[in-house]
Image (cartoon, rainbow, N blue to C red):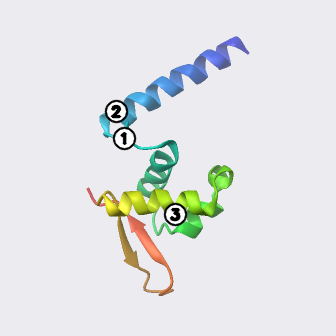
């Protein structure tokens, strides 16, 4: 058990260092999580974020605020889906 707890802390430190490298330290926890989700997946929508089990602890409005922050600050882009015109596909274009 003690080894697992120690490993957990090592993972947290590694994550913190990666977030510093990407300049994410000023973002909130949910903004960092949404950013990571968008950069790790394709055809991401607010619905797909909300349906991921990791995001079950966040309300829809919290997720929408995080997406609004990321799009307003030109960190990610939102493009209308060609399949469902009601959906916006979120993309990170570095």
Query: Under tag 2, what secondary structure?
Result: helix
Tag 2–tag 1 contact (CB < 8 Å): yes
Residue at numbered disc 1: 24
Q: Is residue 29 left or right of residue 23?
A: right
Question: Furthest-left residue in view?
Answer: 94
Label 2 to label 1: alpha-carbon separation? 6 Å
Dot 3, crowdedness within 10 Å: few (<14), some or many (≥20)? Answer: some
Residue at the farthest right position: 1
Q: Nearer the viewer, residue 43 or 69?
A: 69
Asked which quadrant contains residue 23, the reply is top left
Point 37% across, 76% down: residue: 79
Decide: few, some or many residues near mark 1? Use Cα within 10 Å; few <14, some 14-19, many ≥20. some
Between marks 3 and 2 in the image, the one whose residue lies nearer the viewer: 3
Q: Is residue 88 above or below residue 61?
A: below
Image height of 51 relative to 40, above or below: below
Residue closer to the observer: 58 or 3: 58
Alpha-carbon distance for marks 1 and 3?
18 Å
The CA span between labels 3 and 2 is 24 Å
Q: Position of residue 77 (x, y in %)?
A: 34, 67
The disc at residue 20 is 2
Q: Secondary structure at mark 3?
A: helix
């Amino acid at each position: 058990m003690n080894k697992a707890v120690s490993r957990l802390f090592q993972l947290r430190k590694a994550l913190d260092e990666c977030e510093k490298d990407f300049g994410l330290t000023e973002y909130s926890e949910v903004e960092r999580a949404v950013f990571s989700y968008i950069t790790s997946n394709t055809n991401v929508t607010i619905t797909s974020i909300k349906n991921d089990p990791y995001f079950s602890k966040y309300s829809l409005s919290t997720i929408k605020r995080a997406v609004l922050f990321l799009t307003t600050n030109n960190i990610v882009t939102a493009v209308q889906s060609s399949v469902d015109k009601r959906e916006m596909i979120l993309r990170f274009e570095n």
